[in-house]
């Protein structure tokens, strides 16, 4: 949870990075980058003699399967998760292991044995959050420095004693801590949720920066999805999970030939509006993203990596099956509306509950992403502000209590299929809200957010991304990598 008055930007909620986990991969990566920035700022980079990384709690228990060690090493080397060529990651990590050397941000070479200098402390946990990690740094003069961070979900990190993601206080036109606050401003001003969010974003960015930035987020989602529908084979990690999006896509399009995203989308649109056809393609869209995520591909937290497929799947559903007659210029505006609206719903959950599976189970990831997608779709389909909030509530209400029990600690089973379920529930929730009367709704979005947080606190810790319960123990496996 964060303070109700905190402004969470759309660019905080949607972060471009590398899979498979925002909390176990992207967060630790960003923590390592922050450590490097601190050393550089204090001019101590050249004095570093050794670095040891201690992983606690959920990071220790499922860190291998989530690539936490890989993320930490790449961060220490100074690579940016948004821009790194994902094709060279394996080579970089193999070189560190074989040479037992790590070059800190291309400046200082250290002896570094990953099995020795990255420790998975599976029986230890830090009190603030289950996703804790500490960097123990020894300098040439004998002095030692310890920097502790917490990866709190969605790629957000908090340093012990200091909130890194809490920038200087930003005074925005519309302060929003609860869904009722958002509705109040909409009713008072007559603005849509998109417009409220846009006005707040203008305190930090220009109109052009906002629109170009949001479209950049969509293009990253779109490119990830398109890559995913053209990649076959097995997912890494040892579970031998076969990628399905590509074969399903090929079968549904009857082996048609095309040369890019636009012609692919056009072919899908020409396939008609049969219910099973649409349902199959929604699954293809979601599977494609999360198969890429499981393969350490470039994805967008939405609001997390494990739930990265829901929002692009629902947005692609809208593009393919609801917007055939929309001009390209208007479509861009609609994509911006979808993502701005979805972002605000995600920020409400982050403020009032959590978007971390290690804190709240999968309801905090797939549940929140489904609520976000339902809101965005409802806004595009002409729903009122109340119907947008109603759609979000419906989507989350039917994810309450959802556990996180990844088999082998990998973001594969049940995570990948779960994105298809979240996408379908989002579409259904939107339809129900559009046909509903919010004034007669018994459960409000604020109530469901509070309920989700209460449920998260009551949930047994073994169902919070530890691989200690649920499917993870009832489907026995033996993986050398996990």
Image (cartoon, rainbow, N blue to C red):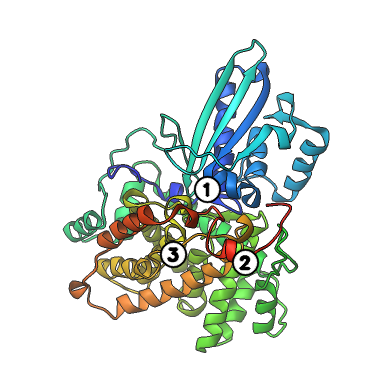
Give the left or right position of residue 273, taking residue 235 as reference: left
Say which residue appears at 56% left-offset and 42% top-offset: 123
Residue 399: give x, y in percent of width and height: 40, 67
Q: Residue at x 36, y 74 (%)?
A: 430
Closer to the chain start, of discs 3 and 1, is 1
Residue 142 figure quarter: top right
Q: Find residue 23 and name its label.
A: 1
Separation of residues labelled 2 and 3 (CA atoms): 18 Å
Badge 2 element: loop
Q: Which residue is mark 2?
A: 475
Report whether residue 49 is seen: yes
Specify which label sits upstream in the sequence, 2 or 3: 3
The CA span between labels 3 and 1 is: 18 Å
The 10 Å Cα crowd at callout 1, few under 14, some 14 to 19, many 20 or more, is many
Q: Quadrant of residue 468?
A: bottom right
User: Would you name the residue on which mark 3 appears?
Assistant: 402
**Percent coordinates x, y for residue 285 in the rendering:** 57, 71
């Amino acid at each position: 949870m964060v303070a109700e008055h905190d402004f969470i930007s759309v660019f905080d909620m949607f972060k471009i990075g590398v899979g498979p986990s925002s909390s176990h991969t992207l967060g630790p990566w960003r923590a390592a980058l922050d450590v490097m920035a601190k050393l550089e700022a204090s001019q101590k980079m050249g004095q570093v003699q050794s670095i040891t990384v201690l992983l606690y709690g959920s990071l220790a228990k499922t860190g291998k399967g989530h690539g936490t060690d890989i993320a930490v090493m790449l961060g220490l080397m100074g690579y940016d998760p948004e821009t790194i060529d994902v094709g060279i990651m394996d080579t970089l990590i193999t070189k560190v292991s074989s040479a037992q050397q790590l070059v800190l941000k291309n400046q200082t070479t250290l002896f570094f044995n990953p099995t020795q200098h990255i420790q998975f402390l599976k029986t230890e946990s830090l009190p603030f959050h289950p996703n804790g990690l500490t960097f123990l740094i020894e300098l040439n003069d004998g002095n030692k420095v310890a920097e502790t961070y917490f990866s709190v979900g969605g790629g957000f990190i908090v340093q012990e004693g200091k909130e890194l993601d809490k920038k200087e206080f930003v005074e925005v036109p519309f302060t929003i801590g609860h869904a009722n606050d958002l509705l109040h401003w909409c009713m008072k001003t007559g603005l849509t949720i998109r417009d409220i969010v846009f006005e707040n974003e203008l305190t930090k960015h220009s109109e052009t920066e906002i629109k170009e930035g949001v479209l950049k987020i969509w293009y990253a989602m779109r490119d990830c999805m398109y890559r995913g529908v053209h990649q076959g084979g097995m997912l890494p990690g040892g579970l031998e999970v076969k990628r399905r999006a590509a074969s399903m896509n090929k079968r549904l399009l009857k082996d048609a030939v095309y040369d890019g995203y636009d012609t692919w989308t056009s072919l899908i649109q020409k396939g008609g509006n049969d219910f099973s056809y649409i349902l199959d393609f929604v699954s293809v869209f979601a599977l494609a993203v999360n198969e890429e995520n499981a393969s350490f591909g470039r994805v967008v937290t939405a609001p997390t990596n494990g739930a990265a497929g829901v929002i692009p799947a629902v947005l692609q559903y809208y593009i393919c099956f609801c917007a055939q007659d929309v001009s390209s210029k208007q479509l861009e505006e609609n994509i911006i509306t979808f993502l701005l609206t979805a972002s605000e719903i995600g920020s409400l959950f982050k403020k009032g509950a959590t978007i971390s599976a290690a804190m709240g189970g999968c309801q905090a990831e797939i549940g929140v992403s489904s609520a976000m997608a339902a809101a965005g779709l409802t806004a595009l389909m002409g729903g009122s502000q109340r119907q947008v909030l109603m759609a979000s509530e419906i989507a989350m209400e039917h994810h309450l209590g959802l556990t996180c029990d990844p088999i082998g600690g990998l973001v594969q089973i049940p995570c990948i299929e779960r994105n298809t379920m979240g996408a379908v529930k989002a579409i259904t929730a939107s339809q129900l809200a559009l046909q509903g009367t919010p004034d007669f709704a018994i459960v409000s979005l604020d109530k469901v957010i509070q309920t989700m947080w209460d449920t998260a606190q009551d949930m047994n810790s073994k169902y919070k991304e530890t691989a200690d319960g649920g499917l993870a123990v009832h489907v026995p496996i033996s993986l050398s990598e996990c």
